[in-house]
Amino acid sequence: MPPIEYLALFSDSIIYLSILFIPFYLWGNDRKKLLLYVICISINLGVVYFLKTIIAVPRPPFALISIPSTPSFPSMHASLGMLPAGFFFYNRKYRVLLLIYGILIAYSRVLLGVHYWIDIVVGASIGFVVPILIFYRKEKIYRVFGLSKHLKKK
């Protein structure tokens, strides 16, 4: 397999970490945080797709892999790559590893030629900031879903 294909495979790994592995991990450990994570992903997807639709910046013309048909700005990969870093930022055990992972995902999208730098910066910022904002409002979210007295952290 050529190096570009490995880079593309790594770049697409965000689906496994962000959308599959972390929710399964939280399902078994802390269902209240699972609710927050699902809310983070939902808001993240909504904001990124809204911006992609409204702004509709075309992709760079020099991609090394097949170019997706969606607009370029902002980068969904960068956003989903940084979402775990923002979500687990309070946890020193995972903080550095997830930040490096998110930065590598974002950088790989530029190397593959499917995004401009501004797409990456804005996408990564959305992915990092949304979970932090959700964590500031977590008690209110728990009350809305009736979880403030139930499902105490183990």
Image (cartoon, helix red, strand yellow):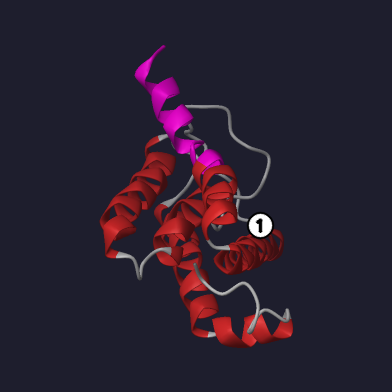
Which residue is painted at 64% across and 62% down in the image? Answer: 38
Residue 132 versus residue 105 in the image, above or below: below
* In the displayed structure image, the side of residue 122 where residue 91 appears, left or right: left
> Measured from the top left, where is residue 90 in percent x and y?
35, 71
Name the residue: 39% across, 59% down: 85
Compare residues 147 and 63 and report the one nearer the observer. 147
Q: Residue at x 47, y 33 (%)?
A: 62
Q: Taking 150 as reference, is 79 left or right?
A: left
Which is nearer the eye, 10 or 56? Answer: 10
Residue bearing mark 1: 56
In the depicted structure, whether residue 33 falls above or below residue 99: below
Q: Residue 3: percent from the left, percent from the top? A: 35, 20
Whether residue 18 sits left or right of residue 98 in the image: it is right
What amino acid does circle 1 point to?
Ala
Q: From the viewer's perspective, is residue 10 above or below residue 154?
A: above
Quadrant that contains the N terminus: top left
Q: For residue 49, what is the image quadrant? A: bottom right
Q: Residues within 10 Å of mark 1 (few under 14, many from 20)?
A: some
Quick check: is 10 in the magenta stretch?
Answer: yes
Q: Nearer the viewer, residue 31 or 94?
A: 31
Going 43% across and 33% down the picture, which residue do you hit? Answer: 10
- The answer to whether one can see residue 60 in this image is no
Residue 110, image x, y percentages: 40, 43
